[in-house]
Amino acid sequence: MITVMLIDDHPIVRAGVRAVLDTATHVTVVGESASGEEGVAAAALLSPDVVLCDLRLGAGIDGIETTRRLRALAAPPAVLILTTYDRDVDILRAIEAGAAGYLLKDAPTVEILGALAAAAAGETVLAPELARRAGALRHDPELTKRELEVLKLVARGDSNRDIARALFVSETTIKTHVAHILTKLGVVNRSHAAAVARERGLIE
């Protein structure tokens, strides 16, 4: 029997997930929480095998920090992120925080139940496409703080001259930063850089 706990700030969503899990004879839901803080405290008492946790949890800590705290417990449960968000940076952050897997809420029931079994057995659960994207992001050279500042202004549509004025540097310096950004992101123009940066969660 696999014992499971749910952490999601939406009662209707928790009820829906619970209904899905109740269809399986080998799964028992032992608890629910509406926030990360409550979830960590409950997990410390209930010792579930697996925690299904949303990425966004309203006020308080998010699913990434919740995962980190759950994995730091004396008897840490496996954690599966179950969310509607599939940004590359979120997937990578979840894995680095110790999540056993990352699932989307529209995943088929059989996929969710299979992921629970795999996570309970100590396996990592990540769809091939999500794994590929997270791996690619992990190997991207990291943008510097200044490059991120420039990238945000590029995405806003500012010209090199506008960015230079905003950051009190020369236009040549901005051209150099933009060249480095394009190289690091593996793109050929400014609009593509902005699109990739948004997809990966580097900018809003």
Image: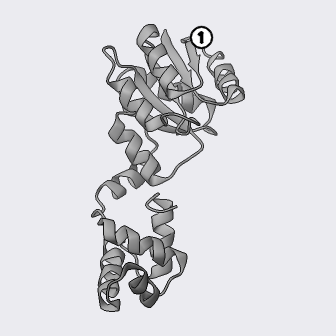
**Colour mode of the rendering:** one colour
Q: Is residue 45 visible?
A: yes
Q: Is residue 125 visible?
A: no
Q: Residue at x 47, y 75 (%)?
A: 153
Relative to 30, does residue 58 appear above or below in the rendering? below
Q: Residue at x 51, y 17 (%)?
A: 4
Q: Quadrant of residue 164?
A: bottom left
Q: Position of residue 122 (x, y in %)?
A: 34, 24
Q: Which residue is mark 1?
A: 25
Extreme residue in the front direction:
168
Q: Residue at x 59, y 25 (%)?
A: 34
110 left or right, relative to 119 = right
In front here: 180 or 153? 153
179 left or right, relative to 195 = left
Q: Residue at x 39, y 45 (%)?
A: 93
Q: Quadrant of residue 24?
A: top right
Q: Position of residue 108 (x, y in %)?
A: 62, 35
Q: Position of residue 58 (x, y in %)?
A: 59, 37
Label 1 sits on a secondary structure element that is: loop
Q: Position of residue 160 (x, y in %)?
A: 42, 87
The amino acid at mark 1 is: Thr
Total numbered labels placed on residues in the image: 1
In front here: 27 or 74? 74
Mark 1: few, some, or many residues within 10 Å (few <14, many ≥20)?
A: few
132 left or right, relative to 84 = left
Relative to 18, does residue 87 appear above or below in the rendering? below
Q: Quadrant of residue 202?
A: bottom left
